[in-house]
Image (spheres, coloured by chain):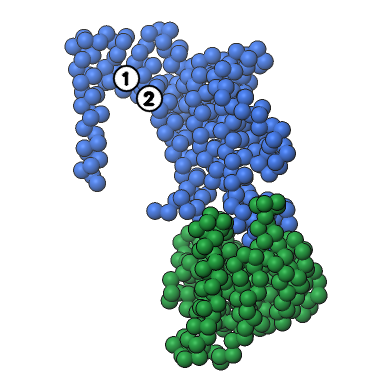
Chain colours: A green, B blue
Amino acid sequence: MSAEIVIANASKVFGSGSGAVAALQDISATVPEGQFLCLLGPSGCGKSTLLNAVAGFTPLSEGTITLGGQAIAEPGPERGMVFQEYALFPWMNVEDNVRFGLDIKGVNRAEATVTVDRIVATLGLSDFRKRYPKDLSGGMRQRVAIARILALDPPVMLMDEPFGALDALTRRTLQDELLRIWAESRKTIVFVTHSIEEAIYLADRILVMTYRPGRIKRDLRVEIPRPRDTASGEFNALKRELAALVMEEQKRFTEAELHGAAVD
Amino acid sequence: MALSRLRGAIVPVALLILWEILSRVGVFSPIVLPPPSAVAVKWYSGLLPGLPYEPGSQSYLSWLFSGEMPHDAVASLARVLSGFVIGAGLAVPIGLLLGTSDRLYGLFSPLLEILRPIPPIAYIPLAIVWFGLGNPPALFLIALGTFFPVLVNTIAGVRQVDSIYIRAARNLGANSWTMFRRVILPAASPFVLAGMRIGIGTAFIVVIVAEMIAVSDGLGYRILEAREYMWSDKIIGGMLTIGILGLIIDGGMSRLNDHLLRWHRGLER
Protein backbone atom coordinates (compact mmCIF):
# COMPACT_ATOMS: atom_id res chain seq x y z
CA MET A 1 0.00 0.00 0.00
CA SER A 2 1.31 3.40 -0.88
CA ALA A 3 1.20 5.85 1.97
CA GLU A 4 -0.02 8.77 -0.07
CA ILE A 5 -2.76 10.81 1.58
CA VAL A 6 -5.22 12.54 -0.69
CA ILE A 7 -7.52 15.13 0.84
CA ALA A 8 -10.24 16.15 -1.60
CA ASN A 9 -12.64 19.05 -1.00
CA ALA A 10 -12.72 18.40 2.72
CA SER A 11 -15.22 20.48 4.69
CA LYS A 12 -16.30 20.16 8.28
CA VAL A 13 -19.09 22.03 9.99
CA PHE A 14 -19.60 21.67 13.73
CA GLY A 15 -23.08 22.31 15.07
CA SER A 16 -25.99 23.54 13.02
CA GLY A 17 -28.16 26.60 12.36
CA SER A 18 -26.87 29.90 13.69
CA GLY A 19 -24.40 28.11 15.98
CA ALA A 20 -22.73 26.32 13.09
CA VAL A 21 -18.97 26.71 12.86
CA ALA A 22 -17.12 25.96 9.66
CA ALA A 23 -13.93 24.38 10.92
CA LEU A 24 -12.71 23.28 7.50
CA GLN A 25 -13.73 24.64 4.15
CA ASP A 26 -12.96 22.95 0.88
CA ILE A 27 -9.46 21.78 1.64
CA SER A 28 -7.64 19.79 -1.00
CA ALA A 29 -4.09 18.57 -0.67
CA THR A 30 -2.03 15.56 -1.61
CA VAL A 31 0.62 14.37 0.79
CA PRO A 32 3.01 12.09 -1.09
CA GLU A 33 4.49 9.05 0.59
CA GLY A 34 7.40 9.91 2.86
CA GLN A 35 6.64 13.61 3.10
CA PHE A 36 6.97 15.47 6.37
CA LEU A 37 4.04 17.88 6.33
CA CYS A 38 3.34 20.51 8.98
CA LEU A 39 -0.06 22.08 9.46
CA LEU A 40 0.56 25.53 10.87
CA GLY A 41 -1.87 28.12 12.17
CA PRO A 42 -3.37 29.80 15.23
CA SER A 43 -5.93 28.21 17.52
CA GLY A 44 -9.22 27.61 15.79
CA CYS A 45 -7.77 27.31 12.30
CA GLY A 46 -8.97 23.74 11.97
CA LYS A 47 -5.51 22.15 11.83
CA SER A 48 -6.38 19.65 14.58
CA THR A 49 -9.77 19.01 12.98
CA LEU A 50 -8.04 18.15 9.73
CA LEU A 51 -5.61 15.85 11.52
CA ASN A 52 -8.47 14.16 13.38
CA ALA A 53 -10.26 13.66 10.08
CA VAL A 54 -7.17 11.94 8.64
CA ALA A 55 -6.97 9.86 11.83
CA GLY A 56 -10.60 8.84 11.34
CA PHE A 57 -11.85 10.35 14.59
CA THR A 58 -13.80 13.19 12.99
CA PRO A 59 -16.01 12.39 10.01
CA LEU A 60 -16.04 15.10 7.35
CA SER A 61 -19.19 17.00 6.45
CA GLU A 62 -18.15 16.96 2.81
CA GLY A 63 -15.27 15.64 0.78
CA THR A 64 -13.06 12.61 1.16
CA ILE A 65 -9.69 11.62 2.50
CA THR A 66 -7.96 8.56 1.14
CA LEU A 67 -4.81 6.74 2.14
CA GLY A 68 -3.23 4.68 -0.60
CA GLY A 69 -6.46 5.03 -2.56
CA GLN A 70 -8.68 3.74 0.22
CA ALA A 71 -11.21 6.02 1.85
CA ILE A 72 -10.66 6.69 5.54
CA ALA A 73 -13.76 5.86 7.55
CA GLU A 74 -12.48 5.09 11.02
CA PRO A 75 -9.33 5.13 13.16
CA GLY A 76 -6.73 2.54 12.31
CA PRO A 77 -3.23 1.49 13.35
CA GLU A 78 -1.78 2.27 9.91
CA ARG A 79 -2.26 5.93 10.87
CA GLY A 80 -0.55 6.04 14.25
CA MET A 81 -1.46 9.09 16.29
CA VAL A 82 0.64 10.93 18.87
CA PHE A 83 -1.41 13.21 21.09
CA GLN A 84 -0.30 16.36 22.84
CA GLU A 85 -1.59 14.93 26.13
CA TYR A 86 0.54 11.77 25.59
CA ALA A 87 -2.53 9.56 26.18
CA LEU A 88 -0.41 6.77 27.59
CA PHE A 89 -2.33 4.14 29.50
CA PRO A 90 -1.33 4.90 33.08
CA TRP A 91 -2.10 1.36 34.29
CA MET A 92 0.42 -0.12 31.87
CA ASN A 93 4.14 0.22 32.32
CA VAL A 94 6.31 1.51 29.48
CA GLU A 95 6.81 -1.94 28.01
CA ASP A 96 3.12 -2.83 28.09
CA ASN A 97 2.16 0.49 26.54
CA VAL A 98 4.52 -0.18 23.65
CA ARG A 99 3.31 -3.77 23.38
CA PHE A 100 -0.39 -2.95 23.47
CA GLY A 101 -0.81 -2.36 19.73
CA LEU A 102 0.98 -5.65 18.99
CA ASP A 103 -1.32 -7.47 21.43
CA ILE A 104 -4.32 -6.02 19.62
CA LYS A 105 -2.87 -7.09 16.31
CA GLY A 106 -2.45 -10.62 17.67
CA VAL A 107 1.33 -10.79 17.29
CA ASN A 108 2.70 -13.68 19.31
CA ARG A 109 4.54 -13.02 22.53
CA ALA A 110 8.06 -13.85 21.37
CA GLU A 111 7.82 -11.82 18.19
CA ALA A 112 6.24 -8.91 20.04
CA THR A 113 9.05 -8.96 22.59
CA VAL A 114 11.65 -8.66 19.84
CA THR A 115 9.82 -5.65 18.39
CA VAL A 116 9.33 -4.03 21.78
CA ASP A 117 13.03 -4.49 22.60
CA ARG A 118 14.05 -2.85 19.38
CA ILE A 119 11.64 0.10 19.60
CA VAL A 120 12.33 0.72 23.27
CA ALA A 121 16.06 0.82 22.51
CA THR A 122 15.54 3.14 19.52
CA LEU A 123 13.84 5.68 21.74
CA GLY A 124 16.29 5.35 24.62
CA LEU A 125 13.70 3.86 26.95
CA SER A 126 15.52 0.65 27.84
CA ASP A 127 16.14 1.68 31.43
CA PHE A 128 12.53 2.68 31.95
CA ARG A 129 10.70 -0.39 30.69
CA LYS A 130 9.06 -1.27 33.97
CA ARG A 131 8.17 2.27 34.97
CA TYR A 132 4.64 3.55 34.98
CA PRO A 133 3.84 6.76 33.07
CA LYS A 134 3.31 8.72 36.27
CA ASP A 135 6.98 8.21 37.10
CA LEU A 136 8.19 9.64 33.77
CA SER A 137 8.89 13.21 32.69
CA GLY A 138 6.86 14.78 29.90
CA GLY A 139 9.61 14.17 27.37
CA MET A 140 9.90 10.51 28.37
CA ARG A 141 6.15 10.09 28.16
CA GLN A 142 6.10 11.45 24.65
CA ARG A 143 8.91 9.06 23.73
CA VAL A 144 6.73 6.21 24.94
CA ALA A 145 3.79 7.54 22.93
CA ILE A 146 5.95 7.61 19.82
CA ALA A 147 7.31 4.14 20.60
CA ARG A 148 3.77 2.85 21.04
CA ILE A 149 2.81 3.70 17.49
CA LEU A 150 6.20 2.85 15.97
CA ALA A 151 5.80 -0.70 17.32
CA LEU A 152 3.09 -1.17 14.70
CA ASP A 153 5.35 0.30 11.99
CA PRO A 154 2.58 2.48 10.54
CA PRO A 155 3.16 4.00 7.10
CA VAL A 156 1.65 7.25 8.41
CA MET A 157 2.31 9.11 11.64
CA LEU A 158 -0.13 11.78 12.78
CA MET A 159 1.12 14.15 15.43
CA ASP A 160 -1.09 16.66 17.20
CA GLU A 161 1.19 19.30 18.74
CA PRO A 162 3.14 16.46 20.32
CA PHE A 163 5.91 18.61 21.77
CA GLY A 164 3.75 21.58 22.74
CA ALA A 165 3.90 20.90 26.45
CA LEU A 166 7.66 20.29 26.64
CA ASP A 167 10.43 22.67 27.61
CA ALA A 168 12.53 24.08 24.77
CA LEU A 169 15.54 21.77 25.18
CA THR A 170 13.54 18.56 25.51
CA ARG A 171 11.53 19.73 22.57
CA ARG A 172 14.57 20.15 20.37
CA THR A 173 15.92 16.75 21.41
CA LEU A 174 12.67 15.04 20.51
CA GLN A 175 12.41 16.96 17.24
CA ASP A 176 15.86 15.67 16.31
CA GLU A 177 14.91 12.13 17.25
CA LEU A 178 11.74 12.35 15.25
CA LEU A 179 13.73 13.55 12.25
CA ARG A 180 16.16 10.67 12.71
CA ILE A 181 13.34 8.13 12.89
CA TRP A 182 11.65 9.71 9.90
CA ALA A 183 14.90 9.70 7.90
CA GLU A 184 15.38 6.00 8.64
CA SER A 185 11.81 4.91 8.02
CA ARG A 186 10.57 7.46 5.47
CA LYS A 187 7.10 7.43 6.92
CA THR A 188 4.57 10.01 5.86
CA ILE A 189 4.17 12.44 8.73
CA VAL A 190 1.41 14.98 9.27
CA PHE A 191 2.42 17.20 12.14
CA VAL A 192 0.22 19.89 13.68
CA THR A 193 1.88 22.84 15.37
CA HIS A 194 1.38 26.50 16.07
CA SER A 195 5.12 27.05 16.39
CA ILE A 196 6.54 28.62 13.25
CA GLU A 197 10.08 27.63 14.19
CA GLU A 198 9.06 24.04 14.81
CA ALA A 199 7.36 23.85 11.44
CA ILE A 200 10.41 25.22 9.59
CA TYR A 201 12.80 23.01 11.57
CA LEU A 202 10.91 19.83 10.79
CA ALA A 203 8.89 20.03 7.63
CA ASP A 204 9.39 19.33 3.95
CA ARG A 205 6.26 21.31 3.38
CA ILE A 206 4.10 23.64 5.43
CA LEU A 207 0.40 24.29 4.99
CA VAL A 208 -0.50 27.57 6.66
CA MET A 209 -4.18 27.54 7.57
CA THR A 210 -6.63 30.41 7.96
CA TYR A 211 -8.66 31.13 11.04
CA ARG A 212 -12.24 29.97 10.65
CA PRO A 213 -13.28 28.76 8.22
CA GLY A 214 -10.12 26.67 8.02
CA ARG A 215 -8.66 26.96 4.55
CA ILE A 216 -5.20 26.62 3.12
CA LYS A 217 -3.68 30.09 3.12
CA ARG A 218 -0.28 29.11 1.81
CA ASP A 219 1.24 25.85 0.63
CA LEU A 220 4.97 26.21 0.97
CA ARG A 221 8.03 23.98 0.57
CA VAL A 222 10.96 24.25 2.93
CA GLU A 223 14.04 23.78 0.79
CA ILE A 224 16.63 24.40 3.51
CA PRO A 225 18.92 21.35 3.75
CA ARG A 226 18.90 19.36 6.98
CA PRO A 227 20.16 19.57 9.66
CA ARG A 228 18.67 23.04 9.72
CA ASP A 229 20.30 25.85 11.61
CA THR A 230 17.64 27.91 13.34
CA ALA A 231 20.03 30.86 13.48
CA SER A 232 20.79 30.92 9.76
CA GLY A 233 19.71 33.70 7.45
CA GLU A 234 17.47 31.63 5.22
CA PHE A 235 15.79 30.06 8.26
CA ASN A 236 14.98 33.47 9.65
CA ALA A 237 13.88 34.86 6.33
CA LEU A 238 11.36 32.07 6.07
CA LYS A 239 10.39 32.55 9.68
CA ARG A 240 9.67 36.23 9.04
CA GLU A 241 7.58 35.42 6.00
CA LEU A 242 5.56 32.78 7.84
CA ALA A 243 5.15 34.91 10.93
CA ALA A 244 3.48 37.60 8.85
CA LEU A 245 1.06 35.05 7.44
CA VAL A 246 0.28 33.40 10.75
CA MET A 247 -0.11 36.69 12.59
CA GLU A 248 -2.78 37.82 10.14
CA GLU A 249 -4.79 34.82 11.14
CA GLN A 250 -3.91 35.20 14.80
CA LYS A 251 -5.30 38.73 14.61
CA ARG A 252 -8.59 37.42 13.24
CA PHE A 253 -8.64 34.84 16.01
CA THR A 254 -8.02 37.47 18.69
CA GLU A 255 -10.78 39.70 17.31
CA ALA A 256 -13.22 36.82 17.24
CA GLU A 257 -12.21 35.90 20.76
CA LEU A 258 -12.80 39.45 21.99
CA HIS A 259 -16.24 39.30 20.43
CA GLY A 260 -16.92 36.07 22.22
CA ALA A 261 -17.10 34.02 19.07
CA ALA A 262 -14.07 31.83 19.52
CA VAL A 263 -14.64 28.39 20.86
CA ASP A 264 -11.67 26.19 20.41
CA MET B 1 8.84 11.59 64.75
CA ALA B 2 9.07 9.59 67.96
CA LEU B 3 8.49 12.79 69.89
CA SER B 4 5.33 13.71 67.99
CA ARG B 5 4.05 10.18 68.46
CA LEU B 6 4.72 10.48 72.16
CA ARG B 7 2.86 13.76 72.21
CA GLY B 8 -0.07 12.11 70.46
CA ALA B 9 -0.32 9.62 73.31
CA ILE B 10 -0.67 12.30 76.00
CA VAL B 11 -4.42 12.91 75.68
CA PRO B 12 -5.53 9.25 75.39
CA VAL B 13 -3.32 8.15 78.30
CA ALA B 14 -4.48 11.05 80.47
CA LEU B 15 -8.09 10.21 79.69
CA LEU B 16 -7.55 6.55 80.59
CA ILE B 17 -5.96 7.50 83.91
CA LEU B 18 -8.76 9.94 84.69
CA TRP B 19 -11.35 7.32 83.79
CA GLU B 20 -9.60 4.71 85.96
CA ILE B 21 -9.50 7.08 88.94
CA LEU B 22 -13.11 8.21 88.59
CA SER B 23 -14.32 4.60 88.34
CA ARG B 24 -12.13 3.45 91.24
CA VAL B 25 -13.26 6.17 93.66
CA GLY B 26 -16.86 5.41 92.78
CA VAL B 27 -17.89 8.44 90.70
CA PHE B 28 -19.15 5.97 88.07
CA SER B 29 -20.71 2.70 89.09
CA PRO B 30 -18.99 -0.33 87.49
CA ILE B 31 -22.19 -0.99 85.54
CA VAL B 32 -22.22 2.44 83.95
CA LEU B 33 -18.49 2.69 83.36
CA PRO B 34 -16.15 -0.03 84.63
CA PRO B 35 -12.50 1.03 85.01
CA PRO B 36 -10.29 0.45 81.98
CA SER B 37 -8.21 -2.04 83.95
CA ALA B 38 -11.29 -4.23 84.42
CA VAL B 39 -12.12 -3.94 80.73
CA ALA B 40 -8.57 -4.96 79.85
CA VAL B 41 -8.68 -7.98 82.16
CA LYS B 42 -12.04 -9.09 80.73
CA TRP B 43 -10.86 -8.51 77.19
CA TYR B 44 -7.74 -10.55 77.75
CA SER B 45 -9.62 -13.42 79.36
CA GLY B 46 -11.97 -13.52 76.36
CA LEU B 47 -8.98 -13.68 74.08
CA LEU B 48 -7.55 -16.80 75.72
CA PRO B 49 -8.74 -20.32 74.90
CA GLY B 50 -11.21 -21.69 77.44
CA LEU B 51 -9.68 -25.12 77.80
CA PRO B 52 -6.05 -26.30 78.09
CA TYR B 53 -4.32 -27.43 74.92
CA GLU B 54 -4.74 -31.12 74.04
CA PRO B 55 -2.20 -32.00 71.34
CA GLY B 56 -4.02 -35.14 70.07
CA SER B 57 -7.49 -33.73 69.45
CA GLN B 58 -6.88 -30.42 67.67
CA SER B 59 -4.28 -28.35 65.90
CA TYR B 60 -2.48 -25.68 67.86
CA LEU B 61 -3.91 -22.95 65.67
CA SER B 62 -7.53 -24.00 66.16
CA TRP B 63 -6.90 -24.23 69.90
CA LEU B 64 -5.40 -20.75 69.88
CA PHE B 65 -8.57 -19.44 68.25
CA SER B 66 -10.95 -21.41 70.42
CA GLY B 67 -11.46 -18.59 72.93
CA GLU B 68 -14.79 -16.82 72.81
CA MET B 69 -13.56 -13.59 71.34
CA PRO B 70 -11.42 -15.04 68.54
CA HIS B 71 -14.33 -17.30 67.66
CA ASP B 72 -16.70 -14.33 67.47
CA ALA B 73 -14.23 -12.22 65.53
CA VAL B 74 -13.75 -14.98 62.97
CA ALA B 75 -17.52 -15.46 62.70
CA SER B 76 -18.08 -11.74 62.11
CA LEU B 77 -15.22 -11.51 59.66
CA ALA B 78 -16.51 -14.53 57.71
CA ARG B 79 -19.94 -12.89 57.46
CA VAL B 80 -18.49 -9.59 56.32
CA LEU B 81 -16.37 -11.27 53.68
CA SER B 82 -19.10 -13.57 52.33
CA GLY B 83 -21.65 -10.77 52.27
CA PHE B 84 -19.11 -8.49 50.64
CA VAL B 85 -18.26 -11.05 47.98
CA ILE B 86 -21.97 -11.53 47.17
CA GLY B 87 -22.71 -7.79 47.15
CA ALA B 88 -19.64 -6.69 45.22
CA GLY B 89 -19.88 -9.74 42.97
CA LEU B 90 -23.30 -8.54 41.85
CA ALA B 91 -22.55 -4.83 41.88
CA VAL B 92 -19.42 -4.84 39.71
CA PRO B 93 -20.88 -6.59 36.63
CA ILE B 94 -24.17 -4.68 36.91
CA GLY B 95 -22.27 -1.44 37.35
CA LEU B 96 -20.08 -2.16 34.32
CA LEU B 97 -23.17 -2.87 32.26
CA LEU B 98 -25.02 0.25 33.39
CA GLY B 99 -21.88 2.35 33.03
CA THR B 100 -21.27 1.23 29.44
CA SER B 101 -24.83 1.37 28.14
CA ASP B 102 -26.53 4.76 28.19
CA ARG B 103 -29.85 3.10 27.47
CA LEU B 104 -29.70 0.72 30.41
CA TYR B 105 -28.42 3.53 32.60
CA GLY B 106 -31.40 5.68 31.62
CA LEU B 107 -33.77 2.84 32.39
CA PHE B 108 -32.34 1.89 35.75
CA SER B 109 -30.91 5.04 37.28
CA PRO B 110 -34.28 6.35 38.59
CA LEU B 111 -34.79 3.06 40.42
CA LEU B 112 -31.30 3.27 41.89
CA GLU B 113 -31.92 6.83 43.01
CA ILE B 114 -34.97 5.64 44.93
CA LEU B 115 -33.35 2.57 46.50
CA ARG B 116 -29.92 3.98 47.23
CA PRO B 117 -30.82 6.33 50.11
CA ILE B 118 -32.58 3.57 52.08
CA PRO B 119 -30.08 2.51 54.77
CA PRO B 120 -29.45 -1.25 54.74
CA ILE B 121 -30.50 -1.32 58.42
CA ALA B 122 -34.02 -0.35 57.31
CA TYR B 123 -34.22 -3.66 55.47
CA ILE B 124 -33.95 -5.67 58.70
CA PRO B 125 -37.66 -6.36 59.19
CA LEU B 126 -38.06 -7.32 55.55
CA ALA B 127 -34.92 -9.47 55.71
CA ILE B 128 -36.37 -11.40 58.65
CA VAL B 129 -39.72 -11.83 56.88
CA TRP B 130 -37.96 -13.09 53.78
CA PHE B 131 -35.18 -15.17 55.26
CA GLY B 132 -36.17 -15.92 58.86
CA LEU B 133 -33.36 -15.90 61.41
CA GLY B 134 -29.77 -17.12 61.16
CA ASN B 135 -27.11 -16.36 58.58
CA PRO B 136 -29.26 -15.79 55.47
CA PRO B 137 -30.82 -12.47 56.57
CA ALA B 138 -27.45 -11.33 57.94
CA LEU B 139 -25.71 -12.08 54.65
CA PHE B 140 -28.53 -10.41 52.74
CA LEU B 141 -28.12 -7.23 54.76
CA ILE B 142 -24.34 -7.21 54.47
CA ALA B 143 -24.48 -7.85 50.73
CA LEU B 144 -27.00 -5.02 50.41
CA GLY B 145 -24.75 -2.70 52.39
CA THR B 146 -21.91 -3.48 49.99
CA PHE B 147 -23.98 -3.47 46.83
CA PHE B 148 -24.92 0.18 46.47
CA PRO B 149 -21.60 1.89 47.15
CA VAL B 150 -19.82 -0.52 44.81
CA LEU B 151 -22.52 -0.17 42.15
CA VAL B 152 -22.63 3.61 42.19
CA ASN B 153 -18.85 3.90 42.08
CA THR B 154 -18.50 1.35 39.31
CA ILE B 155 -21.03 3.18 37.15
CA ALA B 156 -19.30 6.50 37.82
CA GLY B 157 -15.91 4.92 37.14
CA VAL B 158 -16.93 3.61 33.74
CA ARG B 159 -18.70 6.80 32.74
CA GLN B 160 -15.80 9.07 33.60
CA VAL B 161 -13.14 7.18 31.61
CA ASP B 162 -11.13 9.89 29.84
CA SER B 163 -11.99 9.88 26.15
CA ILE B 164 -8.32 10.33 25.27
CA TYR B 165 -7.67 6.70 26.31
CA ILE B 166 -10.56 5.53 24.17
CA ARG B 167 -9.21 7.49 21.22
CA ALA B 168 -5.69 6.19 21.72
CA ALA B 169 -6.90 2.59 21.91
CA ARG B 170 -9.13 2.97 18.85
CA ASN B 171 -6.17 4.40 17.00
CA LEU B 172 -4.19 1.29 17.86
CA GLY B 173 -7.00 -0.82 16.45
CA ALA B 174 -8.70 -2.05 19.62
CA ASN B 175 -12.07 -3.76 19.18
CA SER B 176 -14.84 -3.29 21.76
CA TRP B 177 -13.85 -6.29 23.86
CA THR B 178 -10.20 -5.26 24.10
CA MET B 179 -11.35 -1.72 24.78
CA PHE B 180 -13.50 -2.91 27.63
CA ARG B 181 -11.03 -5.33 29.16
CA ARG B 182 -7.79 -3.41 28.80
CA VAL B 183 -8.90 0.21 28.80
CA ILE B 184 -12.29 0.83 30.39
CA LEU B 185 -11.93 -1.73 33.17
CA PRO B 186 -8.50 -0.59 34.40
CA ALA B 187 -9.39 3.07 33.92
CA ALA B 188 -12.47 2.58 36.08
CA SER B 189 -10.71 0.48 38.70
CA PRO B 190 -9.74 3.33 41.06
CA PHE B 191 -13.43 4.18 41.36
CA VAL B 192 -14.46 0.56 41.74
CA LEU B 193 -11.90 0.01 44.48
CA ALA B 194 -12.94 3.20 46.26
CA GLY B 195 -16.51 1.87 46.16
CA MET B 196 -15.33 -1.43 47.59
CA ARG B 197 -13.61 0.32 50.43
CA ILE B 198 -16.79 2.22 51.29
CA GLY B 199 -18.77 -0.99 50.75
CA ILE B 200 -16.73 -3.07 53.17
CA GLY B 201 -17.00 -0.28 55.73
CA THR B 202 -20.78 -0.35 55.39
CA ALA B 203 -20.74 -4.15 55.52
CA PHE B 204 -18.88 -3.97 58.80
CA ILE B 205 -21.48 -1.66 60.31
CA VAL B 206 -24.28 -3.86 59.04
CA VAL B 207 -22.75 -7.11 60.33
CA ILE B 208 -22.72 -5.83 63.91
CA VAL B 209 -26.38 -4.84 63.72
CA ALA B 210 -27.38 -8.02 61.92
CA GLU B 211 -25.67 -10.13 64.56
CA MET B 212 -27.57 -8.34 67.29
CA ILE B 213 -30.78 -9.50 65.70
CA ALA B 214 -30.50 -12.64 63.68
CA VAL B 215 -27.69 -14.93 64.90
CA SER B 216 -26.15 -16.30 68.08
CA ASP B 217 -22.48 -15.66 67.67
CA GLY B 218 -20.24 -12.91 66.35
CA LEU B 219 -19.05 -9.69 67.96
CA GLY B 220 -22.41 -7.93 67.59
CA TYR B 221 -24.27 -10.75 69.25
CA ARG B 222 -21.72 -10.93 72.06
CA ILE B 223 -21.99 -7.34 73.19
CA LEU B 224 -25.77 -7.48 73.15
CA GLU B 225 -25.63 -10.69 75.16
CA ALA B 226 -23.30 -9.03 77.67
CA ARG B 227 -25.83 -6.25 78.10
CA GLU B 228 -28.42 -8.72 79.34
CA TYR B 229 -26.11 -9.55 82.23
CA MET B 230 -25.05 -5.92 82.65
CA TRP B 231 -21.44 -6.90 81.98
CA SER B 232 -20.32 -3.47 80.94
CA ASP B 233 -16.65 -4.47 80.97
CA LYS B 234 -17.43 -7.15 78.41
CA ILE B 235 -19.49 -4.74 76.30
CA ILE B 236 -16.66 -2.23 76.18
CA GLY B 237 -14.13 -4.99 75.55
CA GLY B 238 -16.29 -6.22 72.66
CA MET B 239 -16.48 -2.72 71.24
CA LEU B 240 -12.71 -2.59 71.42
CA THR B 241 -12.46 -5.83 69.44
CA ILE B 242 -14.93 -4.49 66.87
CA GLY B 243 -12.78 -1.39 66.50
CA ILE B 244 -9.62 -3.44 66.06
CA LEU B 245 -11.26 -5.71 63.49
CA GLY B 246 -12.56 -2.68 61.60
CA LEU B 247 -9.07 -1.22 61.59
CA ILE B 248 -7.63 -4.48 60.27
CA ILE B 249 -10.24 -4.69 57.50
CA ASP B 250 -9.75 -1.11 56.41
CA GLY B 251 -5.98 -1.42 56.63
CA GLY B 252 -6.05 -4.57 54.51
CA MET B 253 -8.31 -2.91 51.96
CA SER B 254 -6.08 0.12 51.82
CA ARG B 255 -2.96 -1.96 51.24
CA LEU B 256 -4.73 -3.91 48.52
CA ASN B 257 -5.72 -0.61 46.90
CA ASP B 258 -2.17 0.69 47.07
CA HIS B 259 -0.92 -2.47 45.42
CA LEU B 260 -3.54 -2.67 42.68
CA LEU B 261 -3.35 1.05 41.97
CA ARG B 262 0.42 1.38 42.15
CA TRP B 263 0.27 2.96 38.70
CA HIS B 264 -2.21 5.58 39.80
CA ARG B 265 -1.31 9.24 39.91
CA GLY B 266 -3.21 9.76 43.13
CA LEU B 267 -0.65 7.60 44.92
CA GLU B 268 2.31 9.75 43.98
CA ARG B 269 4.21 10.60 47.11
Please state the horizontal and vertical placement of residue A127, each as a whole percent of the image.
48, 71
Q: Is residue A17 visible?
A: yes
Q: Mark 1 points at which residue?
A: B39
Is B91 in front, or is B224? B91
Marks 1 and 2 sit apart, C-alpha to C-alpha, by 9 Å
Of the residues under marks 1 and 2, which one precedes in the sequence?
1
Q: What residue type is labelled 1?
A: Val
Q: Which amino acid does label 2 sit on?
A: Leu
Is A50 in front, or is B165? A50
Say which element carries label 2. helix
Is A212 in front, or is B46? A212
Do labels 1 and 2 touch, CB within 8 Å?
A: yes
Quadrant hosting residue A62: bottom right
Indicate the chain on which mark 2 is placed: B
Quadrant hosting residue B192: top right
Question: Share a chain, discs 1 and 2?
Answer: yes
Indicate the chain on which mark 1 is placed: B
Please state the horizontal and vertical placement of residue A169, each as a whole percent of the image.
43, 76
Q: Is residue A146 visible?
A: no
Quadrant hosting residue B108: top right
Please state the horizontal and vertical placement of residue B264, each as a whole percent of the image.
50, 52
Q: Mark 2 points at which residue?
A: B240
Query: Which disc number belongs to residue A37?
Result: none
The residue under the point 63% across, 14% down is B126
The residue under the point 28% across, 10% down is B30
**Left or right: B117 with respect to A165?**
right
The residue under the point 63% across, 48% down is B185
Please state the horizontal and vertical placement of residue A254, each as a whole percent of the image.
51, 63
**Left or right: B49 with respect to B3?**
right
The residue under the point 46% across, 17% down is B222
